[in-house]
Image (cartoon, rainbow, N blue to C red):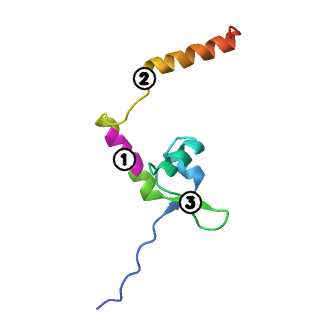
Amino acid sequence: MSPPQPAPTRRTIRRQQLREIVPLADTTIYDMEQRGDFPQRFYLTCRCVVWDLAGAKAWVEMRREASKAKAINRAPARIWRGLVAQAVERAAGIR
């Protein structure tokens, strides 16, 4: 009879590594965490924040599947056209 094996350690990633996997702004990630739409960060020390790598990868895969199923609401195109037009007008000094 062999001795029991210790549970495998789950790999954690820091913010920079997370941003390579999930190219969203820090504030977007934070807002999604607060709503429960993204895996929660946790503290290893008082200054070291990490996320579970498996959780981040699972979230990306879940979003990929939801996108394929057209289950993700996208912003209406007219809103973006209006925002682009406003930005162009501001840059040109019209507004």
- Image vertical order of residue 13 relative to residue 23, above or below: below
Q: Does the magenta stretch include residue 14?
A: no
| Type of the residue with mark 1 | Glu
What residue is rendered at 46% in x and 54% in y? 39
Which x, y percent locates residue 40? 50, 57
Q: Residue 61 carries which label?
A: 1
Q: Name the residue under label 3.
A: 50
**Distance from label 1 to label 3 (Cα)?**
20 Å
Compared across the picture, whether 65 is left or right of 36 comes to left
Mark sitting earlier along the chain (1/3): 3
- Image vertical order of residue 91 relative to residue 12, above or below: above
Residue found at the far front of this picture = 35
What residue is rendered at 68% in x and 14% in y? 91
What residue is rendered at 50% in x and 51% in y? 33
- Image vertical order of residue 78 relative to residue 71, above or below: above
Dot 2 falls on a residue whose secondary structure is loop
The quarter of the image holding the C terminus is top right
Mark sitting earlier along the chain (2/1): 1
Which x, y percent locates residue 10? 45, 66
Residue mark closest to the camera, 2 vs 3: 2
Mark sitting earlier along the chain (2/3): 3
Question: In the depicted view, which residue is nearer to us: 93 or 4?
Answer: 93
What residue is rendered at 46% in x and 71% in y? 9
Dot 1 falls on a residue whose secondary structure is helix
Residue found at the far top of this picture = 94
- Image vertical order of residue 95 relative to residue 18, above or below: above
Magenta segment boundaries in residue numbering: 59-66
Compared across the picture, whether 35 is left or right of 87 comes to left
Q: Quadrant of residue 92?
A: top right
Q: Residue 76 carries which label?
A: 2
- Callout 2 crowding tier (Cα within 10 Å): few <14, some 14–19, many ≥20: few
| Type of the residue with mark 3 | Val
